[in-house]
Image (cartoon, rainbow, N blue to C red):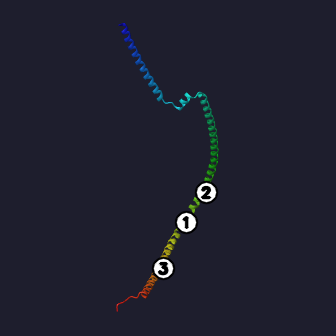
Amino acid sequence: MIESKEVHKGIFQIEWEHKKMEMEMEDLNQKAWDIQMLFFSRERQKYLNEPNYESMIAIQIGIMEQTIAVLDKTHRKNVENCKKLLKKLGKFSNQKDVANYTLSCNLREELVAVSERKDICNAVGSKLTCEKIVKERYENMMQQQKLTNIAKEQAEQISILQAEVERLRMKTFPALLPM
């Protein structure tokens, strides 16, 4: 009996160990699946695969420092060129300011001269304006008369041409008049 108990106990223990191993196997399979599904960036892959990863990073850092130095140098040149351009534009702006000031002074003088002339024209202009209106009316009337005369002459010419056409038609196609 003791032996059968021992055998039974052994069987339970073996079954328990078997279940434990199956559970461990499932756990390991789950871990393997998690590892496969885990995202590895290229940097992580390089770190894992590259034997001299630190030296490679140091080389890349050196290259980046060189590019930064070149970019900084070109930036300084660009800044200096922009400063030179600003100085030139400042000088040009000062020249334009002086020219604008002289032009504005000339403009004021011209405006004064124009206003004086306008006052003189207004004083004398009232007589001239009436004469202009009379002259324009006369010219318009003369032009209307000329146009009327031309229209009359053309009407006469048209009537003469119609009579000529009628005469030529009668000559070519005599009308059969009833007798």
The residue that appears at 61% across and 55% down in the rendered structure is: 103
Task: State which quarter of the image contains the N terminus.
Answer: top left
- For the residue pair 91 and 11, the one nearer the viewer reads as 11
Q: Position of residue 132 (x, y in %)?
A: 52, 71
Q: Residue at x 55, y 66 (%)?
A: 121
Secondary structure state at the residue bearing disc 2:
helix
**Is there CB contact under 8 Å for labels 3 and 1?**
no
Residue labelled with disc 1: 121
Residue bearing mark 3: 150
Is 146 displayed left or right of 108 in the figure? left
Residue topped by disc 2? 106
Q: List x then y, in percent, for residue 161.
A: 45, 83
* Measured Cα–Cα span from mark 3 to mark 1: 40 Å
Per the model, the C-alpha gap separating discs 3 and 2 is 54 Å
Quarter of the image where one finds residue 59: top right
Dot 3, crowdedness within 10 Å: few (<14), some or many (≥20)? few
Mark 2 surroundings within 10 Å by alpha-carbon count, few (fewer than 14), some (14 through 19), many (20 or more): few
Q: Is residue 26 above or below residue 138?
A: above
Q: Which SS class for mark 3?
A: helix
Nearer to us: label 3 or label 2: 3
* Figure label count: 3
User: Which badge, 3 or 1, is on the more N-terminal residue?
Assistant: 1
In this rendering, the answer to whether 84 lies above or below 10 is below
Task: Work out how far the residue at label 1 is from the one at label 2, CA to CA, in angstroms.
Answer: 22 Å
| Front position in the image: 91 or 44 | 44
**Which label was assigned to residue 93?**
none
Mark 1: amino acid: Cys
Tell which circle, 3 or 2, labels the residue nearer the N-terminal end.
2
Left or right of 130, for residue 72: right
The amino acid pointed to by label 3 is Ile
